[in-house]
Image: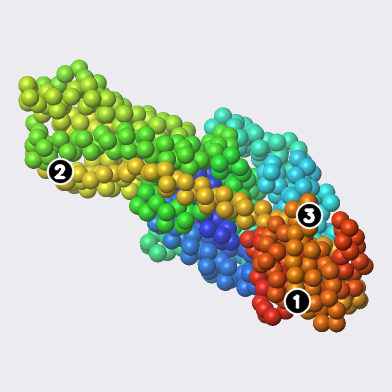
Amino acid sequence: MSKRFTLTAALPYTNGPIHIGHLAGVYVPADIYARYLRLQGHDVAFICGSDEHGVPITIKAKKEGISPQDVVDRYHKIIENSFKEFGISFDNYSRTSSKIHHETASDFFNTLHDKGAFLEETTDQLYDAEAQQFLADRFVLGTCPKCGFTESYGDQCEACGTSHNATDLIEPKSAISGNVPVLKSTKHWYLPLDQHQEFLQSWIGTEHKHDWKSNVYGQCMSWINDGLRPRAVTRDLDWGIPVPVEGADGKVLYVWFDAPIGYISSTKEWARANGKDWEPYWKDEETTLLHFIGKDNIVFHCIIFPAMLKAEGSYILPKNVPANEFLNLEGQKLSTSKNWAVWLPDYLKAFPDQQDVLRYVLTATAPETKDNDFTWKDFQARNNNELVAVYGNFINRVLVLTHKYYSGKVPQLKELTGADKDVLGELSTTPKEIQQSLERFRFREASQILMNLARSGNKYLADEEPWKVIKTNPERVQTIMYTALQIASGLSVLSEPFLPHTAEKLQKMLRLDPIPSWKDVRQGHTLLASGHCIGKPSLLFTKIEDPEIEEQLDLLKASKKSNAVKNTTAVQKTSIPFGDFSKMDLRVGTILTAKKMPKTKKLLVLEVDTGAEVRTIVSGIAEAYAPEAVVGKKVTVLCNLKPRDLRGVESQGMILMAKSDDGQLVFIQPDITHHTVSGVSIC
């Protein structure tokens, strides 16, 4: 019987492209499930969109000197195109800057406001006096009050996943100026989660104790047992959806109030475009609502959003929230800010037409119950040893032998042996086994059940040896190849949720028309009839060689080195008044001679002509420059620094240097007008 499902995948922030952590945690499992449901004949609305509000967007815009709208327009397009090329089969991919979303979120807020579901409170919030701005969410950093992580954001700790308020931080600092913030009064609207505690305790603690994943259930109950508190649903920001009530000038809806409503507005957009009614997908109790998210979003989807839906009164609640843990990269935590990631656009360029390889590896190593690790060596091994050597090898042998022995036509089925019946029996039971795993959200397990069917096909051919039997018993080979072709056809159907590009390619090679259904495979129906003519074989997967992997590892090494340079050069020293700077006597000089100081690695002894005199200056640049390379260079000299004895030589000034973006020391040269540098040193 057909059922209705609404599947949502976490809205990605449009402050950067998608990386493999996002794919493994949210989008690949969500897509597998959506494709699986469609194969069962169910009515599915698979919904997502770009999350274009919130502080990360404004921070990105400030860094780049552009508007927040410029940022979201750029990354929305990149993200949407990447999802399409990778094969994530959203029914609708929207954006929260759209008119329909602004209207939907505003209407939702007004409905709750009219019902008296909010508290209006004037409280003291963190404020950067220099920037003249309240420090919402990621505009403030400090020590997490729960785990002690020293770089927690004002709304959430990325180390332990705890959600909190900015005023909960220990030793907070402004992410804008680095200053210690002050407290300043401001009015906001709060969702009184404490008033929903009893409902949430019963709904989660009783109804979903056994069907929700333990990591989701545990985090929710920890929050509930600690005692829920009112949560602000507005912010003092100039980017976002304006709070649609009087007395709210300069305030916008909190991104975690507005973002999940994006699922609803995206569904409305999809329904309008397809002549459908959106309401059954959100308001009919017969509909199953599922949220696919990462563990850092659990609280918002399991406590805050359900409390919002319950307060509104006409919406269904999620049946399940199958959140995954985090994916690490080469043993280290993925970090967008540190560029420690494998970005989806980069992968698609490096490995064109190999989307399914990454899908398979991320599914086979999915962080379903605990954090897991992605390594390029494992990626290579799983491709070469499983997709190529098992799945691809089986399909290639079946199609090649069919063309060789029968000119591409499916042979006649003769008498079945025990081996034939066993492998055909496994083919018919595999759909149910995959189904049981998927409906418990065990995607890793399901992917290996699929691969085991390919392994059985390989073993069947190896045991039956049709290339030998053809010489003595050609009639028997007809049954062997007929059986193998049924397995190949079954794989083309069952692979669709996991390996959609591969499934489509295989179906075309087999010339399946119509394509058999999941039910056909489960009931043991004939999938390829005798006499059917298949197409020419081509390789489904290709071996990935060592140089391709080494190139990816080198990119990560370069990223780590670049980030280390940025970390060492980005630290700002205490500000000084202009009066202190004006005391410096800076002059243009020319290096006349240079020699290494004996028994040192870093020091050069320079004779520098400053125009009025020739000075001896000892400079710590010997590891960056050979003596002969600096003679004749024009340099900037700090002349009124107190002389200092270095290894028996009196140094009568200092040379101004800077570090380039790649960490190299460069001269601050008066005859060069532009420098791209990341820090200034005096050497």
Between disc 1 and disc 2, whose residue precedes?
A: 2
Quarter occupied by residue 633? bottom right
Per the rendering, the mark at residue 598 is 3
**What's the distance in space between the residues labelled 1 and 2, CA to CA?**
79 Å
Badge 1 amino acid: Thr
Residue at the extreme top of the image, as rendered: 418
Question: What secondary structure is marked by label 2?
Answer: loop
Which one is in front in this view, the residue at disc 3 or the one at disc 1? 3
Pointer 3: residues within 10 angstroms few (<14), some, or many (20+)? few
Q: Residue at x 42, y 46 (%)?
A: 547
State the image coordinates of residue 123 (x, y, percent, origin top left): 84, 59
Query: Is residue 36 left or right of 367 when viewed as pictured?
Result: left
State the image coordinates of residue 115 (x, y, percent, origin top left): 68, 57
Q: Residue at x 52, y 52 (%)?
A: 555
Badge 2 amino acid: Ile
Per the rendering, the mark at residue 590 is 1
Rendered view: 377 above or below 436:
below
Residue matched to label 2: 534
Between disc 3 and disc 1, whose residue precedes?
A: 1
State the image coordinates of residue 539 (x, y, percent, origin top left): 26, 44
**What's the distance in space between the residues labelled 3 and 2, CA to CA?**
80 Å
State the image coordinates of residue 293 (x, y, percent, origin top left): 55, 46
Given contact means CB atoms under 8 Å apart, are the residues at marks 1 and 2 in contact? no
Badge 3 amino acid: Pro
Rendered view: 611 above or below 129:
below
Q: Residue at x 70, y 57 (%)?
A: 623
Quarter occupied by residue 84? bottom left
Query: Is residue 581 left or right of 464 when viewed as pictured?
Result: right
